Every structure is written in structure tokens, then in C-alpha cells.
Image (tube, helix red, strand yellow):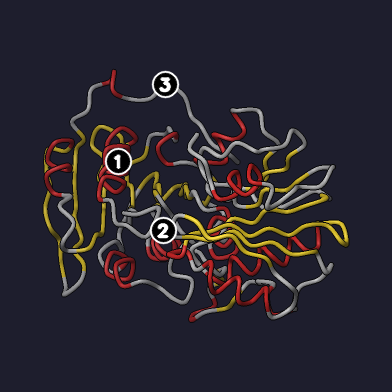
Amino acid sequence: MAPTRLSLALDKGLLVLPDGPVGFWNAPEGFQPPVEDAYLSQAFAPVFDQFRRAGFRVTPTPEGQVAASVVFCHRAREATLDLLSRAMELTDPGGLIVLEGDKTDGVDSAIKALKSIADVETYAKAHGKLAWMVNLGRAPDAWRSDWRLIADGFQTWPGIFSADGVDGGSALLASCTSALMGRLADFGAGWGYLSHMALSQSPEITSATLIEADFHAAEAARRNVMDPRAEIIWGDVQAHVGEYDVILCNPPFHTSRKPDPEIGRAFLRRAATCLAPKGALWCVANRTLPYETTLAEHFRSVETITENAGFKVLHARIPTRTKQSRPAARSRVT
């Protein structure tokens, strides 16, 4: 694994981790703890699965009393401050709090917050920074996240997709799917808006399976989709197996700040493997994303149902995959 700011600081003797267990909160993909007694947290199901398969002690949110905590920045400032708050609660008084992050993930803003409450040392490298301080035992109350209530009584969590309200793409898709039937799946369900709307508008839906990789988004969906027909799964869409009559999808197209349309295309290909022979996919996407070609490769019929200045709704029917292309077993995190 390539050196990181943390490993370089340890190698240079700038930073020394204390004896005892160390927590690595929001540990990134491919991370190798520099200590044997390590607790890891990761809320993104595919990376959580990788850590668990590798034999690490990993939870979706920080857990365990530790001598030091290393917090890796979240892309959302509120989520980073929440991780720091939890780290201070879990770390022994007088222990070590370490923050690691890129500038694009807001590490400078988080360091500024740390400096407002304590003396902080920093090490800058590769367009980011490492910072560390002695644990004070408690962070400011304002750093701790909680469920937030948005319009129409929905609940969300800071840092998840569309945490402040319904995004325009999902709203457009929901306006087109008012008469669905049979077994429904929602791939990348977020905090549950699409499934909530589908279930409230379509009594002919017999079941709804919501698959969402972000732990907090999945927990929000449990609060927002109370229909007894619904099942919420925190897990990786790419590892999920099932057979459905209809799949709804507002696919992600980035895991970092850089867009990657291949992520969305992978969602569409997985949908084709999970649909019944006469099943249908309803997908919304930014107008600039070229998903039609991928859909045409995996479905007999593809049409644009509607579009506006920002989004388009695509309807694909009758998947063309072979039986051999279908996965053999169902996988989930929880």
C-alpha cells in the first residue's frame, strides 16, 4: 500500500500512537491499520464488507473504548465533526485524537474547528493534512449530529445524499411511477423517498426491497418507509441478488468528488440481472449522463419517458441477459 500522511508521520517520529487499542473511524478502502489492536468503522457497505472479509474488527459507526482515535474526514463537514465528537467520547481522557484528510474533503475547516478548542499540531503532505491533539474528553455539543426533520415529515442524517430535501431527479421519477405492480426493488434507495412514494401510490405492489450502501441513509429509510411491504437492506447493490418485477433507480455517479458514470452503468447492469423475464427498470439520471447505450445492451426496449432542464426518466423493459449471467446467491450486510 502506498504511504499515507499517517504512515509517513509515524515513520518520521512526528506522531507516536499510544499503547492500547486504536480506533480508525471512517477508515478508507484498502486501509491497513499500523497497530494490531485496531477498531475500524466504515458506513459504506462495500468497504465495510472488504474490511470484514479481511478479518478486521469493523462496525458501521465508531464503537469501543480506545487509547487513541484516528478520524478520516468525511466529505461533509457536519459528518466529520460528528466523527470527531464520537472519537472524543470513545478515547481515554488524555489520549490522542488524530484527524487525516484531503483539502478537497474539508480537512482545513475541520482543523480550524479543532484549534478552537485545543492545541493542535499538523503535518501537511500531498494536498492534505494530518492533525493531532490531546483528547479533552468531550467535543462541543454542536458537533454531534442528530436526525433532522425535512419537508413532509421525512427524516435524514447529515452527510447522506440529498439530506436537506428531495432531489430534483427523484421527484421527477416519482411523478412517473404511480401505478406499479408486483415485487419492487429500489437500487440505491437513499433515505427512502422513491419507495415511500411508490408504496403510497401503488397498492398493487406486493413487496418492496430497498438496498442502500450508506448506513445512515439506510437507517433513515427505516424511519421514512414504514409500510409493512417494505424491507430495508444496508448492503452493496453489486452483491445483491433477487428477482423483481420492477426496479427503481436513481443511481449514484461518484464515490468521491470526481464524477464517474461507470458507477451508474454498473447499477443498470445489475438491475438487468435482478429483473424477472418481463420486468422493467425505471431510472432517472442527469441529462448529460449517457446511460441509454448501456440500457440498450441489456434490455429489449428503452425509451425516455420525460425530461426537464436537469434530468431525464428512462424506462427499460425485458432484460436480455441469459440465465448464466444471473448471480447464484443473495448477499447483504444486514
Vertically, is 314 above or below 116?
above
Instruction: Work out how far the residue at label 2 is from the one at label 1, CA to CA, in angstroms.
Output: 30 Å
Task: Please name the residue shown 57% across and 61% down the image.
Answer: 226
- The answer to which of 64 and 308 lies nearer the viewer is 64
Q: Kindly state the secondary structure of the residue where label 2 is placed.
A: loop
Q: The C terminus lies in which quarter of the figure?
A: top right
Circle 3 Cα neighbour tier, 10 Å, few/some/many (<14 / 14–19 / ≥20): few
Circle 2 Cα neighbour tier, 10 Å, few/some/many (<14 / 14–19 / ≥20): few
Instruction: Work out how far the residue at label 3 is from the one at label 2, CA to CA, in angstroms.
Output: 31 Å
Circle 1 Cα neighbour tier, 10 Å, few/some/many (<14 / 14–19 / ≥20): some
Q: Kindly state the secondary structure of the residue where label 3 is placed.
A: loop
Q: Which residue is mark 1?
A: 266
In the rendered image, the residue lying farthest to the top is 324
Can you tell which of label 3 and label 1 is closer to the viewer?
Answer: 1
Q: Is residue 319 left or right of residue 118?
A: left
Task: Indicate the amino acid at tag 1.
Answer: Ala
Q: Which residue is mark 3?
A: 328
Q: Is residue 295 left or right of residue 9?
A: left
Q: Are marks 3 and 1 in contact (CB under 8 Å)?
A: no
Q: Are marks 2 and 1 in contact (CB under 8 Å)?
A: no
Q: Kindly state the secondary structure of the residue where label 1 is placed.
A: helix
The number of discs equals 3
In the rendered image, the residue lying farthest to the right is 93
Task: Indicate the amino acid at tag 2.
Answer: Pro
Q: Which residue is mark 2?
A: 203
Along the polypeptide, which appears first: circle 3 or circle 2?
Answer: 2
Indicate the position of residue 237 as horizontal and vertical percent values. Answer: 42, 41
Along the polypeptide, which appears first: circle 3 or circle 1?
Answer: 1
Indicate the position of residue 81 as horizontal and vertical percent values. Answer: 63, 69
Instruction: Work out how far the residue at label 3 is from the one at label 1, CA to CA, in angstroms.
Output: 18 Å
Can you tell which of label 3 and label 2 is closer to the viewer?
Answer: 3
